[in-house]
Image: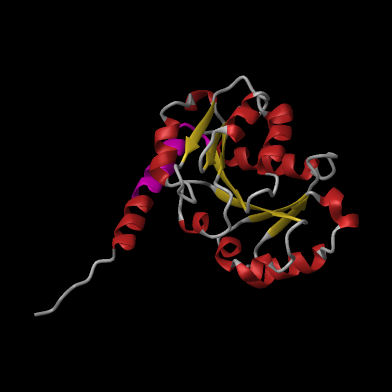
Amino acid sequence: MTVRRIEVRERVMARNDELAAQVRARLARHGVAALNLMSSPGAGKTTLLERTLEVLGEPLAIAVVAGDVQTQNDADRLSVHTGRLVQAVVTGGACHLDALQVSEALDHIDLDRTRLLIIENVGNLVCPASWDLGEQARIVLFTVTEGDDKPLKYPKMFEKADWVVMTKTDLLPYVPFDIERAERNCLQVNSALRFIRVSALTGNGLTGWFDLLHRSVVPLAGV
């Protein structure tokens, strides 16, 4: 008798992909672009989003789903900078968001009044890379306080990404970080990656980041 082994992980991932497709279709019906923002802990996702909401929160009708392991601290920080609901997802120890959590978060967001959805994923360079959330594009924040070999250590995250945002560039004079080497390492893993260098603290490079967000909503503007 042949024994067929079905991996639990494969079933879970397949179900997640189904839900992600439903999320993607739902967002498309409402003309909403979605970006999945990922990084290691402390790379500056929340600070970058604070600056983003201050400038583009209303012009781009931005909604945010903020994922965290144990608290809703990031969501609380972001809510100060927008009159829109910042939907917090507390994973209770899980190291990533999944499509079901995003789908449930969308139930509380007025998609008819939203043009851009930014998903702030859990700080982790491993788990989030495997989970489709229904996003239009994936953006990895890579901070200059990390090692410039991170893309080689965590290749899947960079293989799956569309953009890399180099953060905290104001610290470059004070840390032993070679930003050109870091970008070369990224390209070694994924030659299609595009880069933006920013400092959310000083504002340097934010124009390039804002341009990316503007371009993200253009393809869906007529939906």
Residue at image location 65% in from the left, 64% down from the top: 192
Viewer-nearest residue: 74 or 209 = 74
Is residue 31 inside the magenta stretch? yes
Residue span colored magenta:
18-32
Whether residue 191 is visible here, answered yes or no, is: no
**For residue 57, above or below residue 42:** above
Is residue 109 inside the magenta stretch? no
Q: Percent from the top left, x then y, of residue 60?
A: 64, 30
Q: Percent from the top left, x then y, of residue 80?
A: 66, 23
Residue at image location 34% in from the left, 50% down from the top: 18
Viewer-nearest residue: 82 or 172 = 172
What is the residue that sits farthest to the left in this orientation? Answer: 1
Q: Percent from the top left, x then y, of residue 138?
A: 58, 51
Whether residue 168 is visible here, answered yes or no, is: yes
Residue at image location 51% in from the left, 54% down from the top: 128
**For residue 188, above or below residue 116:** below
Residue at image location 59% in from the left, 68% down from the top: 155
**For residue 188, above or below residue 141:** below
47 sits to left or right of 129: right
Count of residue discs: 0
What is the residue that sits farthest to the right in this orientation? Answer: 173
**For residue 85, above or below residue 92:** above
In which image quadrant can residue 100 be found?
top left
Q: How is the image coloured?
A: secondary structure
Q: Main secondary structure of the magenta part?
A: helix
Q: Percent from the top left, x then y, of residue 123?
A: 59, 49
In which image quadrant can residue 156 be found?
bottom right
The N terminus lies in quadrant: bottom left
64 sits to left or right of 107: right
What is the residue that sits farthest to the bottom in this orientation? Answer: 1
In which image quadrant can residue 85 be found?
top right
